[in-house]
Image (cartoon, coloured by chain):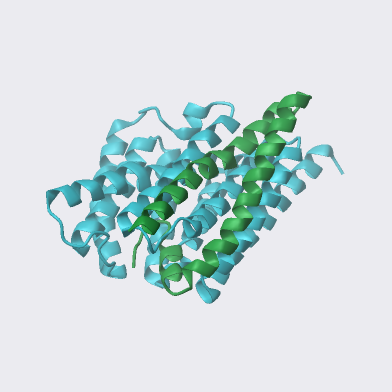
Chain colours: A green, B cyan
């Protein structure tokens, strides 16, 4: 058992099919990432009042997503090559 | 009905709705497993970010965005390949993404440096907090009996544990919970005490998956104590030192 803030996820992940869960949840997140990128670009082009604040909100979720995806790709490629 | 009353009701409504979903997802995760919880969290993050973009109320926007980030962090921790990575590397990856989101999240506030609590205002409180991290880790270790993050290894493995737990896990948790969540919830609840109780409740709920009532209670107490210390002038560095010291003690005792 691990015991940082992600402890519950770690314990539960061990007990379930990782392949099944990662494909489902990963698909949701890829959709979220694409939608957020599109919305951000639309807001940037329109530049209406309030769009700057909305852009900052989008960035809060984009930052972890944009960092997570390269990590996932690299780790999975390394696992495939093993 | 006054305009301020309508705004207040909307804020409390938003806080209640998203918090119920967030805690509900944790309960689902504890009962049905992380995948179900991760899907609920992912959907909630998408809906919440949509509302945060539309609302014209800055306090509600900040709180909903922070709750969306917490939900997303739960989902990301499932998507990152837990089985393919050593536990310490997985922890580092998950916490790096949370830290990135939390760092960007400070820009939602009028004074990001104050929200992140970066300034050293009361160094003595910070030093005291760092020292309190040691008994906190000892009690946590006794209550939870954690398994080691690294099997074997010498000094290098210990240094890696310290770097990940102190430099990533503790910083990310303190910035997100005692920085962003406390600040955002205080703006909505308009009281430090209520924000402390709310933040402690949310933080404790995220440990439901450990299935240890003792550890959940300990984390609720620790979260409330750290929040109170923050209101009394503790900086992010002192809070991080406390949480990080506790995690490092638990890691060393688990070896």
Q: Can you name the residue that lies furthest to the front here?
A: A81
Give percent across and percent down for residue B213.
41, 72
Locate the C terminus of chain A and report the quarter of the image it occupies.
bottom left
The picture quadrant where one finds residue A28 is bottom right
Locate the N terminus of chain A and report the quarter of the image it occupies.
bottom left
- Residue at x 63%, y 62% (from the top left corner): B40
The picture quadrant where one finds residue B3 is top right
Q: Is residue B8 left or right of residue B189?
A: right
- Residue at x 75%, y 28% (from the top left corner): A50
Image position of B125 with respect to B67: above or below = above
| Between B85 and A9, the one nearer to me in the picture | B85
Give percent across and percent down for residue B31.
53, 76
- Residue at x 25%, y 50% (from the top left corner): B161
Is residue B46 in sight in this rendering?
Answer: yes
- Residue at x 66%, y 57% (from the top left corner): B43
Image position of B43 with respect to A69: above or below = below
Give percent across and percent down for residue B28.
57, 71
Q: Can you name the residue that lies furthest to the right here?
A: B1
Is residue A49 in sight in this rendering?
Answer: no
User: How many numbered marks have been drawn onto this rendered protein structure?
Assistant: 0
Give percent across and percent down for residue B253.
19, 61
| Between B199 and B245, the one nearer to me in the picture | B245
Q: Can you name the residue that lies furthest to the left here?
A: B154
Q: Is residue B4 left or right of residue B186?
A: right
Q: Is residue B42 left or right of residue B82?
A: right
């Amino acid at each position: 058992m691990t015991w940082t803030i992600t402890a519950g996820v770690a314990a539960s992940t061990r007990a379930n099919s990782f392949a099944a869960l990662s494909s489902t949840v990963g698909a949701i997140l890829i959709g979220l990432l694409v939608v957020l990128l599109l919305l951000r670009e639309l807001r940037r082009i329109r530049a209406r009042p309030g769009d700057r604040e909305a852009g900052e909100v989008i960035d809060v979720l984009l930052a972890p997503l944009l960092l997570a995806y390269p990590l996932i790709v690299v780790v999975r490629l390394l696992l495939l090559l093993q | 009905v006054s305009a301020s009353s309508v705004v207040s009701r909307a804020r409390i409504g938003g806080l209640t709705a998203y918090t119920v979903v967030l805690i509900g997802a944790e309960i689902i995760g504890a009962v049905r497993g992380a995948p179900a919880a991760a899907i609920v969290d992912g959907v909630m993050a998408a809906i919440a970010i949509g509302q945060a973009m539309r609302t014209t109320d800055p306090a509600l926007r900040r709180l909903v965005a922070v709750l969306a980030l917490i939900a997303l962090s739960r989902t990301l921790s499932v998507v990152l390949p837990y089985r393919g990575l050593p536990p310490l590397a997985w922890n580092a990856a998950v916490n790096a993404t949370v830290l990135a989101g939390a760092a960007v999240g400070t820009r939602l506030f009028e004074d990001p440096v104050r929200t992140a609590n970066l300034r050293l205002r009361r160094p003595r409180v910070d030093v005291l907090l760092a020292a309190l991290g040691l008994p906190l880790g000892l009690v946590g270790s006794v209550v939870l009996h954690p398994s080691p993050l690294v099997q074997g290894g010498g000094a290098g493995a210990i240094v890696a544990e310290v770097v990940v737990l102190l430099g990533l896990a503790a910083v990310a948790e303190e910035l997100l919970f005692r920085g962003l969540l406390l600040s955002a919830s205080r703006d909505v609840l308009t009281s430090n005490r209520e924000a402390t109780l709310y933040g402690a409740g949310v933080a404790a709920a995220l440990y439901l998956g450990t299935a240890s009532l003792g550890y959940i209670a300990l984390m609720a107490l620790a979260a409330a104590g750290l929040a109170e210390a923050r209101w009394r002038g503790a900086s992010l560095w002192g809070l991080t030192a406390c949480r990080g010291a506790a995690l490092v003690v638990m890691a060393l005792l688990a070896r």
